[in-house]
Amino acid sequence: MAQTIYTKNAPDAIGPYSQAKVVGNLVFTSGQIAIDPATGNVDAATIQEQTHQVCKNLKNLLEAAGSDITKAVKTICFLKNMSDFAAFNEIYGEYFTSKPARSCVAAKELPKDVLVEVEVIAEL
């Protein structure tokens, strides 16, 4: 049976952009967007700022599940504009130093009109 993970840094109130599911020895995060957990708002404007917030949210959620960002085995990245890939990848690489398998796709529309959304599968 899956265990749902919420944290004060990604509370239930944020909705589907805040939770993870632990199944067996894996953690599956929902798509994380650049919501500031302190305010519930998307305050970051640039792709770099939004990517930092997304990665912080992922880091907090994985740690709450008993994992961490270095144990990521797969990421799925959605960009509103693929021309942002280089700027996104520079920040992403600061967090995901273990180089998990990754797919990165363009999305016509993302929740709250953000520029980036990332999902992670990680080991416990």
Image: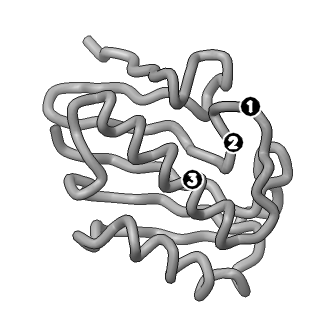
Q: Are marks 2 and 1 in contact (CB under 8 Å)?
A: yes
Asked if the residue at tag 3 contacts the one at tag 2, i.e. Cβ–Cβ closer than 8 Å, the answer is no
Circle 3 residue: 54
Q: CA distance from mark 1 to mark 3?
A: 13 Å
Which mark is first along the chain, 1 or 2? 2
- Separation of marks 2 and 1 at Cα, in angstroms: 6 Å
User: Is the residue marked by circle 2 packed among few (<14), some (14-19), or many (20+) residues within 10 Å?
Assistant: many
Amino acid type, callout 1: Gly
Relative to 124, is 104 above or below?
below
Disc 1 crowd, CA 10 A, few/some/many (<14, 14-19, 20+): few
Comparing 76 with 69, the one in front is 69
Q: Tag 3's secondary structure?
A: helix
Q: Which residue is denoted by mark 1 in the rendering? A: 40
Q: Are marks 1 and 3 in contact (CB under 8 Å)?
A: no
Q: Secondary structure at mark 1?
A: loop
Label for residue 35?
2
User: Can you tell which quarter of the image residue 18 is in?
Assistant: top right
25 above or below 3? below
Q: How many numbered marks appear?
A: 3
Q: x%, y% of residue 94?
A: 40, 73
